[in-house]
């Protein structure tokens, strides 16, 4: 069973990778910061508490009983210190089980004794309360040490959110800087694969990008020059060959040879002329896809109707198995040439053993694809020969290709559908025969101009 890979572009993949790395680094940094800062802060808070307890104990021990009440009132007047006599009915709330408060508790008990009671609230009055004994009397000393605690509220949330947002923005900018020239190169390569000449890529940016774009621009220029040279060469060959062919036809007509000899030579000359025509058709570049899609059913129906009008070309049928629109962004003349080539190929090489040519042209849709099938009941093609026959100047065995030709018909079709993001497939037909399928992308119908 094959697994489908997520349809993510280079920008999305790189951005997600960098974002995850940055967020992981931020989380690790927060953890390390919190861990390294917790112990020193807890130790400072515990030192403050221990010093206050020892001072309070010393003061309560050295003064008289009459002065203790005045000392307690004086301490209560302080904003962060409270002193209470311990009573049996005191309501005590234990410290939270958080790592920070447990570290503070451990430091206090290390200095004041393991039995020291520490509370987070006394009689519903919040603070850090520590019980100690002075002059055979138990006391509670309350301190407000929240400022010594680590910030864990909205302040931390806002700082973490800001750091994460800045990290994501930085990742997006960095990835966009790297992805932009690669995306431009990918679009140019797609245009080149469709037979179009892309605009030159800017040779700016990082040295690797400059060298890559410069190499791509040189490749495009060399391919364009090679294409022009090939077209010029084939045009010259066509002109230089067809002129003597015309003279030879004239000499044959004026000669005294028999009608059978004249017919045989004329067939050979016709074959040479058709071969030259195929070479020129193969060399002719495909047209650019139009801005408005065409209805393939209408075009195919017109071609089939024209072919059926010839009495010698009977046995050609047309049917449509389509749901929804049958529009495609392909040049109409290129599509007509493809369909005519496939019909002619089926007529020449797809005849039954009785010599009949039964050809079906079927237009069907499936999801977002359009299939134009040209089916025959001939001998078919062996599966191992299909890939070879798609190459230029390749011909099958005598069972399938008993006729004459240069072996360019299928290559011409594949060349013409490539700019429209289509392809040609040869399929074995159930019950015998061959199906030549044009696989084209489906397009939406363009709105009508008012």
Image (cartoon, rainbow, N blue to C red):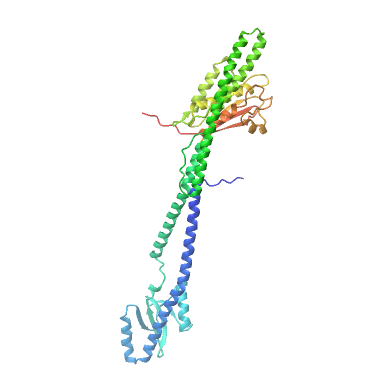
**Residue located farthest toward the top when viewing the structure as drawn:** 256
Q: Position of residue 407 (x, y in %)?
A: 62, 26
Q: Is residue 86 visible?
A: no
Residue at 53 percent of width and 25 percent of height: 337
Q: Is residue 274 above or below residue 291?
A: above
Q: Is residue 211 above or below residue 293?
A: below
Q: Is residue 305 left or right of residue 432?
A: left
Q: Is residue 150 above or below residue 113?
A: above
**341 or 285: which is nearer to us?**
285
Q: Position of residue 423 (x, y in %)?
A: 56, 33
Q: Is residue 385 left or right of residue 111?
A: right
Residue at 36 percent of width and 83 percent of height: 84
Q: Position of residue 266 (x, y in %)?
A: 63, 14
**419 or 273: which is nearer to us?**
273
Residue at 49 percent of width and 53 percent of height: 16
- Which quarter of the figure is the N terminus placed in? top right
Q: Is residue 413 visible?
A: yes
């Amino acid at each position: 069973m094959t697994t489908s890979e997520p349809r993510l572009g280079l920008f999305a993949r790189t951005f997600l990778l960098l974002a995850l790395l940055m967020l992981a680094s931020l989380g690790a940094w927060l953890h390390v910061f919190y861990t390294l800062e917790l112990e020193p802060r807890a130790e400072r808070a515990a030192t403050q508490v221990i010093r206050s307890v020892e001072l309070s104990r010393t003061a309560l021990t050295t003064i008289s009983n009459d002065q203790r009440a005045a000392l307690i009132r004086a301490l209560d007047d302080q904003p962060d210190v409270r002193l209470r006599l311990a009573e049996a009915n005191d309501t005590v709330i234990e410290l939270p089980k958080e790592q920070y408060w447990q570290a503070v508790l451990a430091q206090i008990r290390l200095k004041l004794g393991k039995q020291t009671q520490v509370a987070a609230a006394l009689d519903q009055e919040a603070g850090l309360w520590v019980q100690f004994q002075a002059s055979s009397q138990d006391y509670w000393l309350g301190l407000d040490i929240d400022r010594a605690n680590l910030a864990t509220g909205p302040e931390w949330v806002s700082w973490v959110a800001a750091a994460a947002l800045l990290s994501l923005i930085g990742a997006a900018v960095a990835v966009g800087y790297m992805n932009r020239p690669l995306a431009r190169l990918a679009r140019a390569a797609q245009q080149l694969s469709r037979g179009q000449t892309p605009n030159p890529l800017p040779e700016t940016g990082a040295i690797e990008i400059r060298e890559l774009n410069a190499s791509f621009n040189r490749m495009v220029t060399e391919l364009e020059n090679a294409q022009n040279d090939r077209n010029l060469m084939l045009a010259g060959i066509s002109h230089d060959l067809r002129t003597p062919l015309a003279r030879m036809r004239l000499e044959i007509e004026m000669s005294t040879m028999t009608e059978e000899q004249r017919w045989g030579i004329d067939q050979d000359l016709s074959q040479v002329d058709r071969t030259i025509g195929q070479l020129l058709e193969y060399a002719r570049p495909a047209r650019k896809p139009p801005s408005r899609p065409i209805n393939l059913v209408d075009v195919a129906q017109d071609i089939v109707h024209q072919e059926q009008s010839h009495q010698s070309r009977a046995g050609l049928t047309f049917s449509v198995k389509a749901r929804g629109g049958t529009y495609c962004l392909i040049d109409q003349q290129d599509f007509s040439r493809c369909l005519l080539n496939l019909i002619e190929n089926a007529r020449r090489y797809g005849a039954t053993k009785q010599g009949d040519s039964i050809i079906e042209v079927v237009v069907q849709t499936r999801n977002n694809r359009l299939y134009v099938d040209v089916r025959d009941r001939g001998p078919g093609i062996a599966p191992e020969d299909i890939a070879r026959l798609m190459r230029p100047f390749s011909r099958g065995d005598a069972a399938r290709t008993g006729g004459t030709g240069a072996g360019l018909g299928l290559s011409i079709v594949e060349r013409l559908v490539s700019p429209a993001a289509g392809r040609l497939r040869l399929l074995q037909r159930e019950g015998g025969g061959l199906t030549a399928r044009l696989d084209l992308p489906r397009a939406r119908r363009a709105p009508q101009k008012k």
